[in-house]
Amino acid sequence: MEITAIYPGTFDPVTNGHIDIIARAARLYSKVIVAVAVSSNKVPLFDVEQRVKLLEEVTVKFDNVTIIGFDNLLVDCAKQYNVNVILRGLRAISDFEYEFQLAGMNRRLSPDLETVFLTPAEQYEFISSSMIKEIARLDGDVSSFVPKVVQEHLIEKFNRG
Ligand code: ADP
């Protein structure tokens, strides 16, 4: 049986931590759909088209990875793409409570869909998109946390090109 996965998130912007998870997933599953959430609680820095485009650029080397934008309920999106697994990344303990609740809720909504958690390599454990944006906004160096193209977009956004 072919097992396929959907990896949802805001990816505002994609970081080396996300890419580490995508690389691991690409080795595990026959197909990985990275699903960029249009609507998020926070107003994103990059619009969904930009976030999708950046993800496409930094994942070209994985031929079983596809990037999509989505604006509906995750379990419905997963059904639409016929995937078996919802994939989430787990960093420190702090992610656990929210992720546990989300997985439980998604199971209630769609009992056959399994949530699987992957942990990143140690050097990516502390990276979060929100921190990256804050550092970039204050003109800090984010080159070791995000791909070059993302760094360039951040510099452009904060008008320090
Ligand atoms: P969301 O708003 O859905 O949490 P994010 O883009 O922040 O979207 O994260 C998407 C997924 O990737 C989440 O499961 C999150 O825990 C995970 N993630 C984010 N940063 C990292 C990282 N540095 N290492 C591993 N997983 C991460």
Image (cartoon, rainbow, N blue to C red):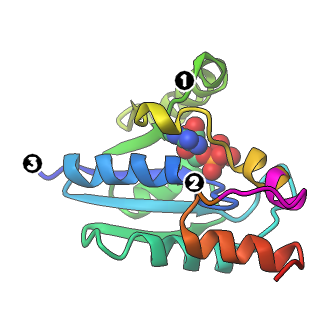
Q: Is residue 39 above or below residue 119?
A: below
Q: Which quadrant is home to the C terminus?
A: bottom right
Where residue 14 appears, as percent x and y from the top left, is: 59, 60
Which numbered disc covers residue 144? Answer: 2
Q: Is mark 2 on a helix, strand or loop?
A: loop
Of the numbered discs 1 and 2, the one sitting upstream in the chain is 1
Question: What is the distance, in whole Å, between disc 1 and disc 2 at their CAs?
Answer: 34 Å
Helix, strand or loop under label 3: loop
Residue 27 in the image: state x and y as whole percent. Answer: 21, 51
* Residue 86 place in picture, x, y as percent: 42, 43
Q: Mark 3 points at which residue?
A: 1
Which portion, as a residue range, is magenta?
135-142
Return the residue nearer the eye: 91 or 69: 91
Residue at 89% from the left image edge and 79% from the top image edge: 159
Q: Mark 1 points at which residue?
A: 104
Magenta stretch mostly in which secondary structure? loop
Q: Which of marks 3 and 1 is nearer the N terminus?
A: 3
User: Pointer 2: residues within 10 angstroms few (<14), some, or many (20+)?
Assistant: few
What distance separates the C-alpha of mark 3 from that of mark 1?
25 Å
Q: To which quarter of the image does residue 66 belong?
A: bottom left
Report whether the residue tagged 3 is closer than 8 Å to ligand 1.
no
